[in-house]
Amino acid sequence: MKENRRAAFLSLGCKVNEYETERLRESFLAAGYEIVLFSEQADVYVVNTCTVTAEADRKSRQMLRRAKKLNPDAVTVCAGCFSESAVKKLGEDLVFSETGADIIAGNATKSDIVALVEKYLTTRERILSLPDINEKGLSYEKTDISTKGKAFEGDEERVRAFLKIQDGCDRFCSYCLIPYARGRSRSRDTGAIISEAKDFIINKKREIVLTGINISSYRGPSGEGLFDLTASLCDELTGLFGNEGIRIRLSSLEPNSFKEEDIKRLSGKGQICPHFHLSLQSGSDSVLKRMNRHYTTQEVLTSVKILREYFDDPAITADIIAGFPGETEKEFEETLLFAEKVGFAKIHVFPFSKREGTKAFSMEGQVKKSEKLFRTGRLIELQDALREEYISRNIGRESTVLIEEKEVSGGTAFFSGYTERYIRTYIPLEKAPDDISPGCMVKGVTKRGEGNDRLIIDSDFIIL
């Protein structure tokens, strides 16, 4: 009886994977499985993998092997992006051998995993389900989910909801495997997005993060773009739930995707978090050209200027790759100077990772590992200084914090969560009102806490 079977899940990599793993949990729940933590013994382990870097590949293999050690008799499923890239690179026999997986499922067949598991349990023959993700006409798959709050006993209450609106990418940046693993860009129906957002709010999610592989490429059925969708979503939620205590956050954005009329319109929507993450990658025009990024640093500066004109000191964050092939010391210095000029609130720094199958893999001028690590360190030093500067500007600012959890730091218990500008903020438990709990939105004036990357609110609370 499958209602006696236990299934466990692990999501690696991006927020899109997190969303899809949630959908997988629900599909197994609907099929009568008990959902347990990945660290527990289960009958089925599903690892939703990542392939964005060589380290992501390693972690994917490691977690699949760990699942087999937890229960050698369990069905192990290798799902997602690593499945797509590894089979093409190594062949299915070697991937089955290296991972110990019983089932390998690509991104186009994640919705079939319950059926694949049932088939394996009947035949005990390994299964490869990997249709061509780049097949022309591939449509956006149905991904609606309805499980909200706790998915299973022992799971943490989730107060922030990731809402997938788009999949795939048409950019084909010279360093990136994702278009090959995820396929071409395709968008979800606007009505389905709005419907699921309403469902999230009804089920007490206070923040919705719009996510996808490249959400800047979103196109609805009538040609509406990302910012049209976002504005419509704000209007719909305001009409039903009011304007207070609900937030919408946008995930990673193309740096040249901002038009003044769109940002002006969004700035009038009270639910939009003033936090914009740019998929920048470099601050050198010559490096951006080799990366096949479709913008210049001047276009990025224009976008930043627009955002700061219409939002009050927004948190503008970015991804930057250190040590891209051919990156000279001069080009690296250009990136440092550009990041300082923009004044990012935070930078996610990555050393360049060679991915076989991309143009950058065989480019001339591969930077030595030691130099990549040195440049990564310098970027991190700059990011730490910029982060401290931005946090300091937020001391004394009235902010709203979405409470996510209780934690203990330095012997003191706190509630903690993120402000609308995505700064981790703490409320001392001993000073918090009795009716504060995870899922609450609290407004108050921030003060400096212990540590550089910390703010606190310890008085004059307003619960939204």
Image: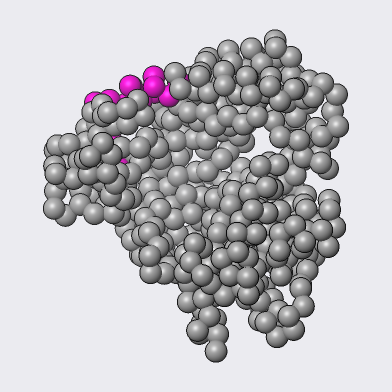
> Is 221 drawn above or below residue 27 in the view shown?
above
Is 398 part of what is drawn in magenta? Answer: yes
Compare residues 290 and 265 and report the one nearer the observer: 290
Q: Which residues are magenta?
A: 386-401
Locate residue 24, reporting x and y percent.
Answer: 56, 68
Residue at coordinates 64% horizontally, 13% vertically from top-left?
334
Q: Quadrant of the N terminus?
A: bottom right
Locate residue 131, reporting x and y percent.
Answer: 80, 65
Residue at coordinates 50% horizontally, 43% vertically from top-left?
250
Q: Is residue 242 left or right of residue 311?
A: left
Locate residue 304, reporting x and y percent.
Answer: 52, 25
> Is 98 drawn above or below residue 346 in the view shown?
below
Question: Is residue 189 visible in this depiction of the protein?
Answer: no
Q: Quadrant of residue 174?
A: top right
Number of on-image labels: 0
Compare residues 191 and 409 and report the one nearer the observer: 409
Q: Quadrant of residue 68?
A: bottom right
